[in-house]
Image (tube, rainbow, N blue to C red):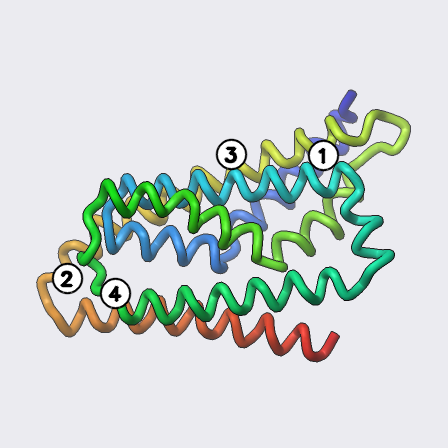
Amino acid sequence: MIDPVLFLAFLPAALALNLTPGADMMFCFAQGVRSGPKAALAASAGISAGSLVHVLLAGLGLGALVAAFPWLFGAIRWVGAAYLLWLAWKTWATPLMAQGPVRASSRAFRDGLIVNLSNPKVILFILALVPQFIDPDLPVLPQFLACGAVLAVGGFVINGLVGVFSGRIGRALLQSPRAERGLRGASSGIFAALAARIGWEALRA
């Protein structure tokens, strides 16, 4: 039910998306620094689950819905910007080692899921690119799900590795309070910059 040529052509496109730094990767980085590898992997799993949700909705016809109601995509952008601003504030206000790994991991999956679901770049990528690798003469939903599995597995591995290694490096850096504040400030600034960019793009749309 899947065209192998189209599927193989999709692989490098999916890899490029997973390797592009963005809100997903920075969230895993922050979780790794704050609470260690376990929280980073939980966050990465939440992000991958979000990717599967995006693909499932696209396969069920979200593309047609957004095309019929353009304001829906704009609303998704603003929700994503608002959540990233909240995440920026929370990252800046919360010391990196303030939360224990077990409790942080239980929230990391949920927050990773929200970060991914509210990220308009993921939505745009799926709605714009994935259909190009779909054969309309074959069942559409299985093809979307296969592409989603590639995105989810690749994202889990790459974002998870970023979080795991950031945790090890971050724990060494946190011996210095100045380094701890710098890491929080850098992560918070990136989230805020992403939110500002999303808001700007939404205003221009």
- SS under mark 4: loop
Picture coordinates of residue 35, whole percent (x, y): 24, 49
Cα separation between marks 4 and 2: 14 Å
Circle nearer the N terminus (4, 2): 4
Tag 1: amino acid = Phe
Tag 3: amino acid = Val
Does residue 102 lie above or below 191 as drawn?
above
Circle 3 residue: 153
Q: Please tell me which residue is depicted at 29% across the width and 50% down the height of the picture.
A: 32
Circle 1 residue: 144
Marks 1,3: beta carbons within 8 A: no
Marks 3,2: beta carbons within 8 A: no
- SS under mark 3: helix
Circle nearer the N terminus (1, 4): 4
Circle 4 residue: 94
- SS under mark 1: helix
- Label 2 Cα crowd, 10 Å radius (few <14 / some 14-19 / many 20+): some
Marks 3,4: beta carbons within 8 A: no
Q: Give the farthest residue toward the left.
A: 175
Q: Please tell me which residue is depicted at 25% across the width and 55% down the height of the picture.
A: 33
- Label 1 Cα crowd, 10 Å radius (few <14 / some 14-19 / many 20+): many
Circle 2 residue: 174
Cα separation between marks 1 and 2: 43 Å
Cα separation between marks 1 and 4: 39 Å
Cα separation between marks 3 and 2: 31 Å
